[in-house]
Amino acid sequence: MRVFKAKYKDRQGNIRETKRYYIDFRDADDVRRKIPCYTDRRQTKKLAEKIEQLIILKHNTEPLSRDLDQWLQSIPQDIFNNLMRIGLIDELKAKSTKPLAEHLEDFEQSLLAAGGTSKNAKQVKSRVKRIFDECKFTFWNDIQASRVQHTISVLRKYVKTKAGLKDLGEISAQTYNHYLKNVKEFCKWMVDDRRASESPVNHLQTISVNADRRHDRRSLEPDEIRRLLEATQSAGERFGMAGHQRALLYRLAVETGLRRDELKSLKKSSFDFENYTVTVEAAYSKNRKQSTLPLRKDTAAELQSFVAGKLPSVQVFKVPEKTADMLKEDLAAAKIPYVDDAGRYADFHALRHSTGSLLAASGAHPKVVQSIMRHSDINMTMSRYTHIFRGQESEAVAGLPDLSLPSKEKQKAIATGTDNMAIQNDGKSVLSICLAKSGTKNQSQPEKTGLSEEKVNNENAVCETETAFLDFAPVAQLDRASVYGTEG
C-alpha cells in the first residue's frame, strides 16, 4: 500500500503534483486500486491503515467493528463513495451511514405514497425526529434501544399559548405508546427498504394504559344527544359553522362513528342516497381502507336536502380544527356537563364512543358493532367504545328469573295437594283447607278456627300462593311462569 502525490502535465506542459495524496493498493480480489484522499499526508496514511483493515474484513467476510463503523460515518462523502464503488463497503452499509435526517425525509414520503394523509405523515416524522434529537442520534448505528426507551419515558407535554410554551407535565402512557410505535415503525421501514439489516428497537414493548387514563371519554345518553341536537339546531354560528350544520354533523357522527378527519373529508360524491350509504376514502380512514357505512333513511333524506346545489367535489362540512371546543360550547348551551362526576370527558371523539354504546344497547351482534366501528380487534370495540347507559344494569337485574317462586317439584306437590309441608294437623291438604276457607270471614282469627295464631298465619300464607296459581296459571303452564315470573 503506497501513499503518494500524483504528477501530471498542465496546459503549458509543466510537470505538477496534485494537491491531494493518493493511496495505491490491491483490494480483497487482488485488483489494483488508486483513489484520491486528503491534502494532508498524515491523514492519508491513517486512511490507508483503515482501508487495509477493510480489505482484511472483506477477504474474511467478517462484519465491521464498531470503531470502523463510526469511522466510516466521519469520512468525507467522496472518499466514502469511492470505497463503496470499489466494493469495500456494501450498499446496505452505505445506506446505514446516511444521516438519519435524510432517512426521515424518505420515510415521510413513503408514508404519503402508501396513502397516508399529510397530517399523519408529518406527525409521525415529527415524533421520531424529536426522540432522535433528544437522544442525539445522527446515524443509524447510533440508535440504542435503552436510550430510546428512557428518552420517551421522561418526555413532557407542551402546548403553545400566547405567553409561550406551557408545560403540562409528563406525557401519558398512551402518548408514550404512540412515540414508541412511531419509532418502531420507522426502524421497521428501514429494514423493509433494505437500508438496515435489523431493527434495534424491535424488542421494546408498549406499556399498559389502563392504570394511567388521563382523558377517559364517556358516551352521551340518548336523551342527552337529543337535547344537544335541539340546542345546537336553534343556536347561532360557532367556529364558522351555523347551528343546523353543527347539529347535522353531530348527528352523522353519532349514527356512523366517523372520526373528525373522516367527516371533514366528506364530499357530496361520498354519499349514495339511493342505497343510504356514506363512503370514506382510504386516504382519510385511520386503517387506510376505503369504508362504506350505512345511513338511517331519515338522516340520509336530511343530508340530501343539505347538500342540494353543491358540486360533487365540494366539501360538505367545514369542520374546524378545534372540534372539542366547539362541542364544549354546544354542550354547555344544552346544559350537559363536558366532564361528568367520574371525570370522563364528552369531547368530539366521545360521539364515536356514543355510537358503539348505542349499537350495543340496541342488541346488535358484537361483530356487527365491530364492523361499523371498523376496529381490527373486537376487544377494542367492546372494552373501550361501549359504555353502560343509565338504568341498564337495573333492567338487566330485573330480567333475572324470580327465585322466590317454588321449584318445579314444589309446584306439582302444591297443585296436587301432596306436599308434605302442606299437610297440617288432621292430614288435610292445604288445597282442601283453602277451598274450605273460601267464602268465610275472619279466617285469620285463631279463636274461630281452633288453631294457634302461628298456624293460622302459615295456612293463610300458603293459601295465598295456592290461590294465585289457581287463578293465573294452569298446571300445564306453571313451569315457564314460575321460572320467569310471566304468563306463558
Image: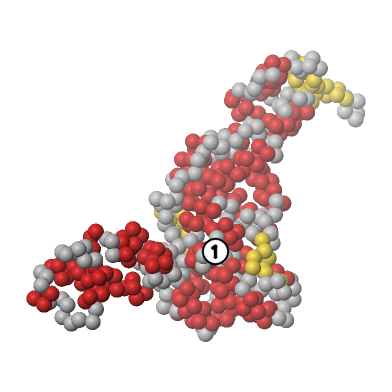
Q: Which quarter shows the N terminus?
A: top right
- Where disc 1 sits, the SS reads loop
Number of numbered discs present?
Answer: 1
Quadrant of the image occupied by residue 34? top right
Q: Is residue 52 above or below residue 83?
A: above
Foreground residue among 206 and 320: 206
Q: Percent position (x, y) of residue 92?
A: 70, 32
| Residue 481 in view (yes/no) | no
Q: Is residue 171 above or below residue 327?
A: above
- Write the residue at 65% across / 32% down: 197
How many C-alpha atoms fall within 10 Å of the one at disc 1: few (<14), some, or many (≥20)? Answer: few
Q: Percent position (x, y) of residue 267?
A: 69, 70
Q: Which quarter shows the C terminus?
A: bottom left
Amino acid at the residue labelled 1 = Ala
Q: Percent position (x, y) of residue 211?
A: 39, 50
Q: Is residue 483 above or below residue 98?
A: below
According to the image, label 1 marks what residue?
364
Foreground residue among 251 and 175: 251
Is 78 situated left or right of 262 in this image?
right
Judged from this view, the residue extending furthest toward the bottom is 234
